[in-house]
Image: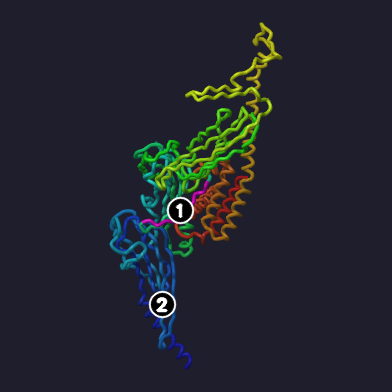
Amino acid sequence: MKKSGIYILFLLLFGWQWAQAADNVRFTASAPEEVAVGQQFQIVFQVNGNGKGFTAPDFKGLTVLSGPNTSTSSSLQFINGKMSQSYTITFSYIVMAEKTGTFYVQPAIITVDGKQYRSDKLQIDVVKGSPRNNPAGNPGQRTGTSGTVQGNNGQITAKDVFVKATVNNAHPYMGQQVVVTYKIYTRVPVSNLAINKVSSFKGFWSQDLLSDNARIQQSNETIDGQQYVVAVIRKLALIPQQVGKLTIDPMQLNCVVQLRVQRQRSGDPFDDFFNDPFFNQNVKNINKTLVANAVHIDVKPLPEAGKPACFSGAVGDFKFETSVDKTSLSTNDALTYTINLTGRGNIELIDAPKVGFPSDFETYDPKIVDNTIKTDIGISGSKKFEYLAIPRNPGDFTIDPVKFCYFNPADKKYHTLTSPSYKIHVVKGKGGGNNMVYTGNAQEDIQFLGKDIRHIESGPYNFVKVNTYLFGSVLFYILMLIPVVLLIVALILRKVIENRKANVSLLKNRKANKVARTKLMKAQKIKKTGNDKAFYDEIALALWGYIADKFDLKQSDLSMDSVREKLEQRQVAEETITGFISTLNNIEYARFAPGNTRDKMENIYAEALSAIMQAEKSLK
């Protein structure tokens, strides 16, 4: 009896304290009082109890980028014989306003110990420029509530995704190499980048520094407090060919912007999990045209002071070397004179230097070997000129020094490089003997070479019978048949090529699944290293490459619409098509989504593997 009384007293004591704690439930909301257009900020809802059935408000006029992100904390303490307990649940959202005005966030609802609680209504003022207080992501001092998440309104602002053109030197000298870079900045997932209007480079010699099959390299960059995913989409080396103010017209490209449209929340924790922005498959694709800014370049003329006579337009920083393969040879033997030019600048536009060979040497146009390379800072490398010279007379000769002059913009000076002279000893070889040279001191030297005065040829002679004609002869009919034979050969070759192409397409179709699995295995290895960007690139290559090989499509023809169209033509089940498209969307989102997506790699890998297996099963 005494024990039961103690238990009743214990329950009354602690039950009263629990009831008192329930009466002190507070459900609050906080958000910045004032934000700027395009600024990302946080709305936080917090309840100091074990709440259930959280229902978010309508974020009308605001775009939800992430949320609800849920966290909990609890503690139990006994102080001076008294028990105290605290339990807190936090629901946070990252949102963005796309236009100015005053927006209201309606109350959120949550249930604690069977009783329903509402937060207050929030008021948020959206202004142009920088807000007076409460920077992005820092909750203000207002309190209130939150409710059901709606998708964004499908509007993309100029701050969400844009293309920017920059030049490393806006005031070059004529002939000085400059680099123009086009970058895309995005805070939303983008795909299917396609340049539909290239910039014109009037007044410039241009060279693309990015290869066609180069992967787009991306990085993160913060602008005005906002984090962007940045990728270089085009980079060119330009060499101005005229003086004055030149303008590079804007480049225009199309892309598909992917917006996540979130579903209505019911408060079910499973619904909240699968409505996470990463797993939510409600994607709205918006075609967007981006226009880069024009670039203005003021080209300065090269200085006239100190310009050497040998200067022929080379601008940059160069080294100059010459060599001969032999200094002793016989008449009618060949000698090779080599000039090797290395450095950085307009090396591809440099003409072959003039070499002063003796008049007894027969010379030919030089063979040019171009070993220039393209880097992020422009064009550099080497250029080799090989001159072939054949001495026709014996004797001792001298090849005079060759001068190469260039202007270096770094020190704004002209430089002259001079090669050594070469002494060449020529002995009489076989077949020579009638070559003679006469030179004088007159203004015009008279030179007679053996090839200019020749002896009368003495037998044997090839006589031709008179009154013979081509028409009607055997040769005539042979010549008439040659075009017909060539036409037949061309038709046969065309047929052979078509058959080979068909075989190649069939082979690619059969090996599509194997190639895709190989790329997935490579992605699995990359995943273990933790390199999420490389992992998502390899996964994307696996899925897009599978479709390209399966339907013999070019990379330029690949898009979400073309994938759906090809799969529907093969009468693939709608569920399989939707799953494949959804997987592609998730991959593209992960590739370009700001922040760390490393935790999603395992799920993406499983989705990609399942999508390819289901598609392969339907396409067999």
Looking at the image, which residue sits at the far right? Answer: 460
On the image, numbered disc 1 is attached to which residue? Answer: 282
Q: Which residue is drawn at 53% across and 55% down?
A: 534
Q: What stretch is highlighted in magenta?
A: 214-223
Residue 13 visible to an observer of this rendering = no
**Looking at the image, how many numbered discs can be counted on the residues?**
2
Query: In screen coordinates, is 318 left or right of 49?
Result: right
Q: Residue at x 48, y 42 (%)?
A: 417
Q: Which of 449 and 241 is in front in this view?
A: 449
Q: Residue at x 51, y 24 (%)?
A: 445
Picture coordinates of residue 597 (x, y %)?
49, 59
Q: Is residue 554 above or below residue 106?
A: above
Magenta stretch contains residue 221: yes
Picture coordinates of residue 67 (x, y %)?
42, 62
Q: In which quarter of the image is the C terminus?
A: top right
Query: In screen coordinates, is 381 left or right of 332?
Result: left
In the picture, the disc for residue 48 is: none
Residue 302 visible to an observer of this rendering = yes
Picture coordinates of residue 216 (x, y %)?
49, 49
Cα distance in 3D space between marks 1 and 2 = 38 Å
Which amino acid type corresponds to the residue marked 2 in the rendered image? Ser
Which amino acid type corresponds to the residue marked 1 in the rendered image? Asn
**Looking at the magenta stretch, what is its main secondary structure?**
strand
Looking at the image, which residue sits at the far bottom? Answer: 2
